[in-house]
């Protein structure tokens, strides 16, 4: 399906009308940020990682977001249970391989989780996508040392391996599945000065995937909304602290007209 401002807005309206429950097993750094972003968009967040209850929460949720930002044994145990359960129930699994390539433990956990339950969408920066695809990519902690375009071939390899959608975040966001590619050029460099914006993009992708079973389209819509909201926030005040607040307001106040005026989408 050709994607357009109208199709993006239709998904935003569905999220606002349905308030899908998005189950997040995510990191301590971003829990508050991503929960508030989901609420501002219109979704309902749950931040649940205890192994004793993740299966129950997956069962009542509309999507599962798994983020490996602050790994420990409890988080990993919850992920091992939640991902196969979500796949068994036909619920979308969104995976964020934060910092993969930085340590052997992250590499091991990521490989194990991908083998256990192939995600429907993977979102990461260029270094993370390249490392996850088995390339010896350099990383600086959780930051990428590459532009997003450098990871396109790795993303295609990863998409072929998982059968899912792969999103490379950067100055331009590449959304790839099989022979399909969408490029979102929205956003602002100041967004890199606020922690957890990539993790927020992953969480928002969970909300869009919860109401749109075309996960390529859902991921593209999420990245477009993310970038446009960032632009709107920066225009109110170009400073990192203000951006965090104004970004939430931009999600909450987002209109079809703003999407139509600002969308920078290329489809290949």
Image (cartoon, grey):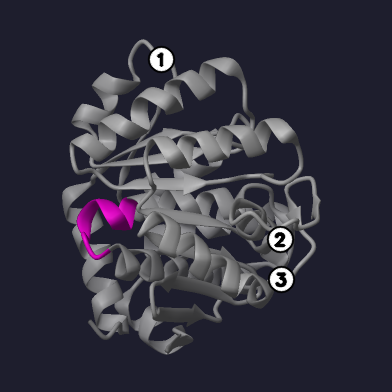
Query: For the residues carrying marks 3 and 1, which lies nearer the camera in this image?
Result: 1
Query: Where does the magenta region start and end?
Result: 207-214
Q: Name the residue under label 3.
A: 189
Q: Name the residue under label 1.
A: 51
Badge 3 element: helix
**Which residue is found at the position 35% from the left and 59% from the top?**
163
* Observer-nearest of 134 and 230: 134
Q: Mark 2 points at which residue?
A: 192
**Left or right, 35 with reference to 6:** right
Residue 95 at what x, y percent from top left? 46, 46
Kindly report the distance in space between the C-alpha atoms of the residues bearing marks 2 and 1. Answer: 32 Å
Residue 249 in sight here: yes
Residue 261 at what x, y percent from top left? 42, 88
Dot 2, how many residues are within 10 Å of its Cα: few (below 14), some (14-19), or many (20+)?
some
Q: Does residue 189 sit above or below 115 in this rendering?
A: below
Residue 90 at what x, y percent from top left? 19, 43
């Amino acid at each position: 399906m050709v994607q357009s401002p109208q199709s993006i807005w239709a998904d935003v309206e569905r999220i606002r009308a349905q308030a899908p429950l998005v189950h997040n097993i995510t990191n301590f750094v971003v829990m508050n940020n991503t929960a508030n972003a989901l609420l501002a968009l219109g979704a309902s967040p749950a931040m649940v990682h205890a192994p004793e209850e993740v299966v129950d929460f997956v069962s009542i949720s509309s999507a599962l977001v798994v983020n490996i930002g602050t790994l420990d044994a409890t988080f990993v145990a919850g992920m091992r249970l939640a991902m196969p359960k979500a796949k068994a129930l036909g619920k979308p699994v969104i995976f964020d391989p934060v910092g993969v390539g930085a340590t052997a433990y992250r590499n091991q956990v990521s490989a194990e989780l991908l083998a256990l339950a192939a995600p429907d969408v993977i979102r990461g920066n260029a270094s993370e996508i390249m490392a996850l695809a088995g390339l010896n990519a350099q990383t600086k902690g959780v930051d990428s040392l590459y532009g997003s375009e450098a990871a396109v071939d790795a993303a295609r390899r990863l998409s072929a391996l998982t059968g899912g959608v792969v999103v490379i975040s950067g100055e331009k966001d590449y959304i790839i599945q099989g022979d399909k590619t969408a490029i979102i050029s929205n956003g602002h460099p100041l967004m890199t000065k606020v922690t957890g914006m990539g993790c927020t993009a992953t969480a928002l992708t969970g909300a869009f995937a919860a109401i749109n079973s075309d996960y390529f389209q859902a991921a593209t819509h999420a990245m477009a909304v993310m970038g446009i909201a960032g632009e709107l926030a920066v225009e109110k005040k170009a400073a990192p602290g203000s951006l965090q607040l104004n970004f939430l307001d931009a999600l909450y106040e987002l209109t079809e007209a703003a999407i139509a005026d600002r969308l920078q989408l290329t489809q290949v």
